[in-house]
Amino acid sequence: MEAGSMILKTLFSIGSIICAWVVCTFIYRLYFHPLSRYPGPWMGQITDWYAVYHCLQDDNHSNFARLHAKYGKFVRYGPNRLSINSNQAWTLVYGKKANTMKSDWYDVWAVLSKDSPSIHTTRDKAIHTRKRRILSHSFSEKMLQTYEASLLSLVEKLTESIALAKRKSGWTSPVDMSHMFSAFSFDVMGEFCFGRSFCALDGDLEMERLLTNMKMAFKGMNTVSLIASYSRTVLNRLQLGYMYSVAPLFASIIKVFPVLLKDLRDYQTFCGALARDVIEKVEFGSCKPNVFSTLLKRSIDGSETFDSLEMESESALLVTAGSETTAVALSNTLFHLLNNPNEVNRLREELDVQFSSADEIRPGKTLNGCEYLSAAISESLRLSPVVHSMIQRLVLPGGLNIEGHHIPAGVDVAAPQSVVHRNPEYFPDALTFKPSRWIKSAQVTEESVHLAEASTNPFSSGAANCIGKAWALTEMKVAIARLVWLFDMEMERPKDTDDLDTIQMFLWRDRQAVDRFTTFADGPLVRFRLRQK
Ligand code: HEM
C-alpha cells in the first residue's frame, strides 16, 4: 500500500514538474522571449506545433497571407520564428551579404540526401560555395546552348501530342496541363542532366510511377516523412521541418526501418543508375553533353569536380529541383493567360511580328527580345510564385536590421514570396494579372518597373539562389510561345466557378493549391484547336 502511494506521489511530482516546466516555458515565450513584442497567433507564439499544423493542412501560402493581413509587416508564427512582409528581405535576409545562413530546417531535408548532402541541403557556407563553383560549369551560357536541341525536340513532342489528341468539332477534349507539363519538364531534366529523355511524355508507365514517386519526394522534403508509401497515416504528412529537434530520431527510425523511404530510395537508385550510365558513355566517348558528362570530363581533365557520391546526390536533387518547379510555373502562366484572354491576344500580336512559323520559335535573341512574353512570365511568377511561403534563414551573431527592427541572432526569419509579391505598397492592383506593369510606357513609369523588379524574388537571391533560373526561363519561353502561336485555347472552368470574375477565379485556384515548399495547383484543364488565322 505504502509502495503504491509512493509511486503515485512520485508520478504526481514528475507530472507537476513537467506541467510547471511547460507553463514556465509558455510564460517565458509569451512575455519574456526577445520576440515577445512581435504580434502573431498565440498558439504560434508558444509552440512550433502551430507551424506543423499548417503544414499538415498544406495551407501555409494562404495562412501567411491571412496572418500578415491581420498582424502587419512582422508576424511571429513560431516561438523563435518571424515572417516578414518586406521587399528589403530579398537583400537583407537572402542576399549575398546577408547576415544569415540556411536554417536548421535544411538539416531535416539532408536526412533524405542519403550519404552526401546536395547543394540545396548543405548549410555550411564554404562547402556550399565549393559545390556551387563546380556545378556552375554545367550551367554556363555556352553549356545551356548545347542543351537547346534536346529542349526543342521535347517542345515539339509536347505540341504534337496536343495536336494529335482526340477532338470534336476541331477542339480537343480538356487536357490536364499540370500533368502534361510535369511529364514535359521531367523529360527535359532527363536530357539536361543525363543526356536522355525519361519518355514520360510517351506515357511510359514506369516513368509515370517514378514521376509520382518524385512528387512524393518533393512533398516529403518539406513533409519529411516520405514514409508515405509505407504507412498512409498522419505520419506520412508530418512536417518535421519545423520540429528539427526530432530530426535525429527520424534518421534513426529510417536506419532501423529503411523500407519507410522506399519510394525515395527507388528514385535515388534510378538517378544513380542514370549517372553511372553517363560515366560509361563518357568513357566510350558516346555521350551528348549534359550536366553529368560536363562534371565527369572535368575529373578526366584533372579539374575540380564532385566525387561519385556527390554526383548521385546532385543528380537526384537536380531532377526534382528542375522539373516540378518549372512544370508548376508553366501551368500557372498558362492559367493566368487563359484567365485573361486579352493578354493572350496581346502576346500573340507580339509573337506574330517576330516569327512567321512555330519552328522559328527557339531560344535566342529574338525570343529574349519578346518583352510581352517575358512580362507575362514575370507577372505569373509574381502572382503565383512556385515557392509560395517559407525559405527559412537563421540570423547569425550580430543580428539583422530590417525595416527599423533589430532581429537578434538565432531567430529563424523568412519572407513569404506570395505575401510580398501581392503587397499593394509595391504593386498597384496587386491581385490583377497585368504583364504591362513590367514594361515602361506612357502609363508605366521607369520607377514603378524598378519597384516591381526589386519586390519580386521567385528564384530567391544571393549565393543560394536558383542555379537553374536561366534554363527555367528559356524552357518556359519556348513552351508558352509555341503553344500560343500554334493553338487556340479555352480553359475548362471547374464546377461552380462560372460566376467568378477574373480575380476571384485566380483566388479560387490559389486556395485549391497545396503548399509543400513547392506549391502545387491542379490544371488548368485546357481545350485546344489548331489556331484559326
Ligand atoms: C520556374 C522554375 C524554378 C523556380 C521558380 C525555382 C526556384 C528556386 C528557389 C526559390 C530556390 C531557392 C530555394 C532555397 O533557398 O531553399 C531554388 C534553388 C535551386 N534551384 Fe531552382 N527553381 C526553378 C527551376 C530550376 C531548374 C530548371 C533547376 C535546374 C536545372 C533548378 C535548380 C535549383 C538548384 C540546384 C537550387 C539550389 C541552389 C543552391 O542552394 O545553391 N531550379 N530554385
Image (cartoon, rainbow, N blue to C red):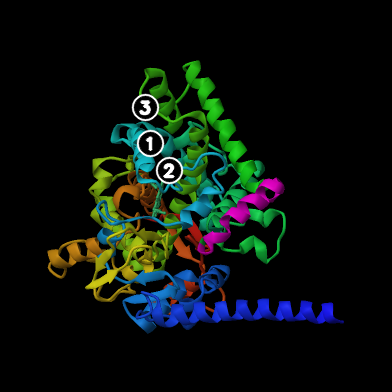
Q: Are marks 3 and 1 in contact (CB under 8 Å)?
A: no
Q: Which residue is denoted by mark 3 in the rendering? A: 304
- Mark 2 closeness class: few <14, some 14–19, many ≥20 residues within 10 Å: many
Callout 2 secondary element: loop
Q: Is residue 506 left or right of residue 236?
A: left
Q: Nearer the viewer, mark 3 or mark 1?
A: 3
Q: Is residue 136 above or below residue 420?
A: above
Q: Earlier in the sequence, mark 2 or mark 3?
A: 2
Callout 1 secondary element: helix
**Residue sitting at 57 percent across and 39 percent down?**
199
Q: Are marks 1 and 2 in contact (CB under 8 Å)?
A: yes
Position of residue 265 measured from the top left corner of the image (x, y, whole percent)? 63, 43
Within 8 Å of ligand 1, the CB of disc 1? Answer: yes
Q: Is residue 419 left or right of residue 442?
A: right
Q: Which residue is denoted by mark 1 in the rendering? A: 135
Within 8 Å of ligand 1, the CB of disc 2? Answer: yes
Magenta stretch: give its range.
242-260
Q: Is residue 186 above or below residue 515?
A: above
Q: Is residue 5 above or below residue 433?
A: below
Q: In terms of image quadrants, where is residue 468?
A: top left
Q: Which residue is denoted by mark 2 in the rendering? A: 119
Q: Main secondary structure of the magenta part?
A: helix
- Number of numbered discs on residues: 3
Position of residue 176 measured from the top left corner of the image (x, y, whole percent)? 55, 58
